[in-house]
Amino acid sequence: MGIAICALACTWLMAAAPAWAASGHGSAELKLAQHDKGRSLSGQGVSIVAGAPAQKTGSLLTLPISSLELGAAPSAAGDGSLAFQRGKRSVALTGVRFDLAAGTLDGNLGGQGLALFRLGAHPDVDPAADRLALSEGSLRLTADAATLLKQKLGLERALRHNGVGMIWLGAQRTASQKIDPAPPKPSPVVRPLLSGA
């Protein structure tokens, strides 16, 4: 019984503990590979374009970082959007997020949430300085993303997963904001019925 009470108390304490939202600044830079032919994205005529405030200069694509988490599962959120274009067809990638614990770049691709790229490197996290960095990651398409892009863009051949490009990411946490949990709902009051009333 003591164990059950402790478990209940621990659950209550965890539920009542405040959460923390962290803002951050930095950027992720993607150096896109260029292929004249083959089964890669660029080899099949697919270009990746940036939506503000993300920017693209030549084959270098820059995504600003707007938030950063440095806990047991480090992650960072990017500002802006990307789009995969081939001819008149286009597939948007929104809600860009770097799941650095899983080593993936995630987002909503054509309205479907999935892991788009594997990053091929682990971040160097420095909790004391509230920052992290990822260097020379090698971007690889996930199987789900490759299938979805082939379908949406009307590609003739299955996409090769590697050969997308390289990634560097550097970000620092700038502030933390305490988010109080929602107050507990009051329990209904149960009144006994009086007999003979």
Image: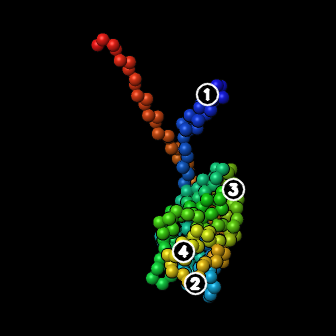
**Mark 2 belongs to which amino acid?**
Gln
Q: Answer whether residue 39 is visible to the viewer in this image.
A: yes
Please name the residue shown 57% across and 70% down the image. 145
Residue 121 image offset from top left, x and y in percent: 70, 65
Q: Earlier in the sequence, mark 2 or mark 3?
A: 2
Residues under numbered marks 4 and 2 in contact, where contact means CB atoms less than 8 Å apart: no
Residue named by callout 1: 5
Dot 1 falls on a residue whose secondary structure is helix
Q: Residues under labels 3 and 4: Cα distance?
A: 32 Å
Residue 130 image offset from top left, x and y in percent: 64, 53
Residues under numbered marks 2 and 3 in contact, where contact means CB atoms less than 8 Å apart: no
Residue named by callout 2: 44
Say which quadrant the N terminus sits in: top right
Which of the numbered marks, if any, corresponds to residue 149? 4
Q: Earlier in the sequence, mark 4 or mark 2?
A: 2
Residues under numbered marks 3 and 4 in contact, where contact means CB atoms less than 8 Å apart: no
Q: Residues under labels 1 and 3: Cα distance?
A: 37 Å
Q: Earlier in the sequence, mark 3 or mark 4?
A: 3
Residues under numbered marks 1 and 2 in contact, where contact means CB atoms less than 8 Å apart: no
**Mark 4 belongs to which amino acid?**
Leu
**Mark 1 belongs to which amino acid?**
Ile
Residue named by callout 3: 125
Dot 4 falls on a residue whose secondary structure is helix
